[in-house]
Image (cartoon, rainbow, N blue to C red):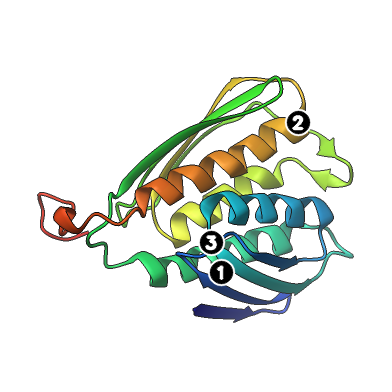
Amino acid sequence: MIEVTRETKETQISVKLNLYGTGLANINTGVGFYDHMLEAFTKHAHIDMEVNCVGDTHIDDHHTVEDVAIVIGQALRQAIYPVQSIERFGNATVVMDEASISCDIDLSNRGYLVFELPIGGKVGDFDVELVEEFFKAFAFNLPLTLHLIYNRGKNKHHIIEGAFKALAVALRRAVTVNENAGIPSTKGVL
């Protein structure tokens, strides 16, 4: 079990995770829609994860969303790197009713994000612009190369949830154990 904490003037966060779990989630960020997305991510990545955050949500949800993503990325970094005996690359396309989202990742130890989800406005009280902030903080703190591509869809909830689930499945595939892979790089290190 990996445990990472972070405390700032804006947030106090604790994340515990087991990379090779069964999808158990105990998520408490104070932001309901975000909790729902992280629970979906945990379930479909087959990660056991506990997240507790007390944040300045009386201002807005930005610090909570970004800082939790930072800490999840840091915890996954400890669980994954140095990369050895895993597939390294993963991809998935997830559909939710009318929505279809594709995710491609490389556990490259280099942070990069391609974010092509045409969404804006709100889902309930949740500012949709924070979705990109999550994926950016996640990608650069893990770090990994992450491409999220919108294929189709109209419902913002479905598009966002499809993105979280597509990342989860791609990550699950990338960390699949492959004893023959050794260090999966021609450089000999990641």
Which quarter of the rendered picture does the C terminus lie within?
Answer: bottom left
**Residue at the image position 63 percent from the left and 64 percent from the top:** 24
Classify mark 3: helix, strand or loop. loop
Q: Considering only order in the chain, which callout, 3 or 2, is on the residue closer to the N terminus?
A: 3
**Residue at the image position 44 percent from the left and 49 percent from the top:** 171
Label 2: few (<14), some (14–19) or many (≥20) C-alpha neighbours in 10 Å: some
Which of labels 3 and 1 is toward the front? 3
Q: CA distance from mark 3 to mark 1?
A: 15 Å
Camera-side residue of 6 and 82: 82
Image coordinates of residue 42 in percent, x first then y, are: 60, 56
Image coordinates of residue 21 in percent, x first then y, are: 51, 65
Q: Considering only order in the chain, which callout, 1 or 3, is on the residue closer to the N terminus?
A: 3
Q: CA distance from mark 1 to mark 2?
A: 26 Å
Above or below 15: residue 96: above
Label 3: few (<14), some (14–19) or many (≥20) C-alpha neighbours in 10 Å: many
Which residue carries the number 3 mark? 47
Which residue carries the number 1 mark? 71
**Residue at the image position 49 percent from the left and 44 percent from the top:** 169
Classify mark 1: helix, strand or loop. helix
Residues at badges 1 and 2 in contact (C-beta under 8 Å)? no
Q: Of the numbered discs in the image, which one, if any, rests on residue 156? A: 2
Classify mark 2: helix, strand or loop. helix
